[in-house]
Image: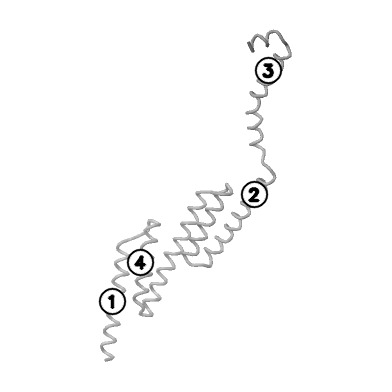
Amino acid sequence: MFCYQLRKSPTYLNITAALLLVLLMAPLAIAQDKTRQSPDEIARQKMLKREASVALQRLKRSMKKDAFYSGRVALNVWQSTAVDAGTFDQAQYDKFKTQLYEKSVNDSIRCFEETLLEEDFYNANFCLQTWRMHSKELGTYDQDDYEVYLKKMADAKAANAARRAKEK
C-alpha cells in the first residue's frame, strides 16, 4: 500500500528520498563532529600538557637533589601525566629510569663505605642490599664484587669485636 502511494504521489517520493538521504548522511556528519574538539576539550588537553611539563621539571629536579624513592615517585608521576597528555616517550622514560638506578647504585656504595667507617653494620648491610638490587635492575651486578663487599663488612665487624674485647 505504501509503495502504491509512492508511485502515485511525487510528494511522498520526494519526502521518502529526503529522509533516506538524511539517514545515510547522518553517520558522516557525526564522524566529522568527533574530529573537531570542543573548547573544553582543547582547554583540557592544554592543561594535561602543562601538567606533564611540570611533572617533567619536577622529575629532573628530583633526580638531581632527592634520593631514589623520591625520584622513583617523580618518574611515575611524570609517566602518568605524560600518558594522559599523549606526550609519553618510552625511550625517554627508560633513559630517566636508568639514570635514577645508576645514581642509586653510586649512592648505595658511598653509603656502604660511610656506614662501614662509622661501624654501623646494620645500615651498611642495608646499603649493600640496595646496591645489589639496583645493580641487578641495571644488569651491572657482579657476584664477585658483592662477595668483596661482604668480606669487607665481615672484616670490619671482626675488627670492631676485637677492639671491644681488648677494651674490656
Question: Residue at image x 54%, y 56%?
Answer: 78
| Image quadrant in which you'd find residue 3 | top right
Amino acid type, callout 3: Thr
Question: Residue at image x 38%, y 69%?
Answer: 127
Residue holding disc 3: 16
Quadrant including the N terminus: top right
| Image quadrant in which you'd find residue 153 | bottom left
Residue holding disc 4: 129
Tell me the distance, in whole angstroms, between the alpha carbons under discs 4 and 2: 44 Å
Badge nearest the viewer, 2 or 3: 3
Badge nearest the viewer, 1 or 3: 3
- Describe residue 54's horizontal placement relative to residue 72 as left or right: right
Tell me the distance, in whole angstroms, between the alpha carbons under discs 1 and 3: 96 Å
- Describe residue 110's horizontal placement relative to residue 54 as left or right: left
**What secondary structure is marked by label 1?**
helix
Tell me the distance, in whole angstroms, between the alpha carbons under discs 1 and 4: 18 Å
Tell me the distance, in whole angstroms, between the alpha carbons under discs 2 and 3: 43 Å
Marks 4 & 2, CB-CB < 8 Å contact: no
**What secondary structure is marked by label 3?**
helix
Amino acid type, callout 1: Asp
**What secondary structure is marked by label 4?**
helix
**Location of residue 152 with respect to 50 vertically, above or below:** below
Residue holding disc 1: 155
Quadrant including the C terminus: bottom left
Residue holding disc 2: 44
Q: Residues within 10 Å of mark 4 (few under 14, many from 20)?
A: some
